[in-house]
């Protein structure tokens, strides 16, 4: 990880120095720019009616979670789930100097809790080159968390809608370097970043989607990522390619374990947005998440720390948005989510040593539709319906299926 961080920081310095040298001769700054601030705030009330086929998980301590794994709005809720709950999203920026911004993003809802996603300085070295430092967003996915015109109450992409994936869609203390470039009708942006979630005690227990033991604590957590975006300005058609890598380590202090878990994850993301007409657009996304960890116990006895786990998760989404009128937007989406876990375990009283492909597997399908109505410049409502079904199972066990429906109504205010 030290090599990754060193390489990234060297690259940041190299890109900065080269671009500054090449561009300083041709760029003239507009000295008439004055300090100003921008603020956007959304708040409201969400009401959900959930209709799952399974009311409760049969064994919450294991992955036999036929209710939770439907990923309805009650799944992995940070706060005690309530059918009617408030939410707020705030974002803004303050121009500190002629070419320096202070960015700020904050949200609070029962799904993810209260969360500060961004608080950073954005220094535009030139119209083409910039650096962000502080609490920065990974810029990996197209999650609509802070969009003011999103048609969804709950996004169809599970990496955007559940708190278990916050480590890949939120932010962390770090540094980013980005390049903006326009050529003809196209605009390009490339970004590279290094992140340290444990810094300033921002995310002290973040360990991907895996808890080694109840009392574990994280000893190291480092990330590095790159992202590329291209947009055709005349049509709004756009693509994104990104990757983020994580290296983590945690210690389990339980006397019977005394184990160190080392973990690596990678998220590969590809997305495209295409306008069929001025009012009709299609968006497709593909996420591939890979995780591998190994636990080594200093006492060499506890079987829970003598396993190697490799996790592979894919999310595919296809969305269609249709703006019927300037005030009414309809959205339709299909989502496929698959999990495949491979376990290499040591012998215990109940199992033999070996590698078990598909030790745990899940297949999840969702269909969703939504209608957003902007009653005026401030007040809006969203009505959403989702139907999901899933099948999960452990190696050698019968599959555990379940399904569910969710109907939601949002009353929102935008400022």
Image (cartoon, rainbow, N blue to C red):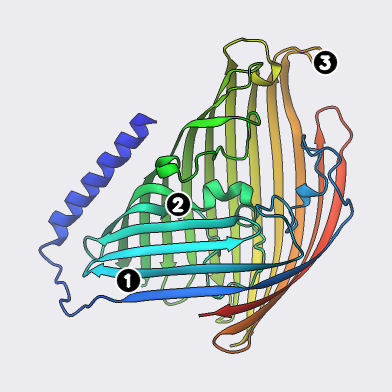
Does 328 appear above or below 242? Answer: below
92, 400: nearer the viewer:
92
Pointer 1 local density, CA inside 10 Å: few below 14, some 14–19, many at least 20:
few
**Tag 2 residue:** 138
SS assignment at label 2: loop
SS assignment at label 3: loop
Does 96 appear above or below 65? Answer: below
Q: CA distance from mark 1 to mark 3?
A: 65 Å
Query: Which mark identifies residue 350?
Result: 3
In screen coordinates, is 210 left or right of 83?
left
**Tag 1 residue:** 184
Place residue 398 in its image quadrant.
Answer: top right
262, 190: nearer the viewer:
262
In screen coordinates, is 375 left or right of 241?
right
Residue at the location (62% across, 30% down)?
215
Q: CA distance from mark 2 to mark 1?
A: 28 Å
In screen coordinates, is 118 left or right of 310?
left
Does 230 appear above or below 63? Answer: below
Q: Position of residue 9 (x, y in %)?
A: 28, 41
**Are the residues at dot 1 and dot 3 in contact (C-beta closer than 8 Å)?**
no
Label 1 vs label 3, nearer the camera? 3
Q: Position of residue 130 (x, y in %)?
A: 28, 58
Does 393 appear above or below 239? Answer: above
């Amino acid at each position: 990880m030290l090599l990754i961080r060193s390489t990234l920081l060297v690259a940041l310095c190299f890109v900065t120095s080269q671009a500054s040298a090449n561009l300083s001769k041709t760029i003239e700054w507009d000295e008439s720019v004055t300090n100003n601030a921008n603020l956007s705030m959304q708040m409201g009330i969400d009401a959900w009616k959930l209709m799952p086929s399974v009311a409760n998980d049969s064994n919450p301590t294991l992955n036999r979670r036929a209710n939770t794994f439907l990923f309805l709005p009650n799944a992995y809720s940070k706060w005690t789930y309530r059918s009617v709950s408030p939410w707020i999203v705030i974002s803004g920026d303050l121009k500190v100097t002629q070419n320096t911004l202070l960015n700020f993003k904050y949200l609070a809802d029962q799904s993810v809790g209260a969360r500060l996603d961004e608080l950073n300085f954005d220094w535009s070295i030139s119209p083409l080159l910039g650096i962000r430092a502080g609490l920065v967003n990974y810029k990996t996915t197209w999650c609509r968390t802070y969009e003011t015109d999103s048609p969804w109450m709950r996004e169809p992409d599970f990496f955007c809608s559940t708190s278990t994936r916050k480590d890949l869609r939120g932010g962390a203390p770090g540094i980013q370097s980005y390049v903006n470039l326009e050529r003809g009708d196209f605009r390009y942006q490339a970004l590279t970043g290094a992140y340290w979630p444990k810094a300033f005690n921002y995310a002290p227990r973040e360990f991907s989607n895996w808890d080694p033991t109840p009392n574990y604590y994280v000893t190291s957590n480092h990330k590095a990522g790159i992202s590329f975006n291209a947009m055709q300005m005349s049509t709004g058609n756009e693509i994104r390619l990104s990757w983020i890598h994580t290296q983590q380590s945690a210690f389990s202090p339980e006397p019977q374990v005394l184990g160190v878990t080392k973990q690596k994850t990678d998220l590969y993301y590809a997305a495209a947005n295409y306008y069929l007409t001025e009012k009709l657009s299609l968006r497709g996304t593909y996420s591939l998440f890979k995780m591998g960890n190994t636990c080594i116990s200093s006492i060499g006895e506890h079987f829970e720390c003598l396993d190697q786990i490799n996790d592979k998760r894919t999310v595919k989404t296809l969305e269609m948005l249709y703006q019927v009128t300037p005030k009414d937007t309809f959205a339709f989406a299909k989502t496929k989510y698959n999990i495949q876990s491979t376990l290499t375990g040591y012998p215990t009283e109940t199992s033999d040593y070996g590698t078990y492909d598909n030790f745990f597997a899940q297949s999840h399908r969702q269909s969703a539709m939504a209608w957003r109505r902007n009653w005026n410049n401030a007040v809006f409502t969203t009505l959403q319906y989702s139907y999901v079904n899933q099948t999960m199972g452990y190696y050698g066990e019968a599959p555990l299926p379940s399904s569910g429906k969710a109907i939601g109504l949002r009353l929102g205010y935008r400022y």
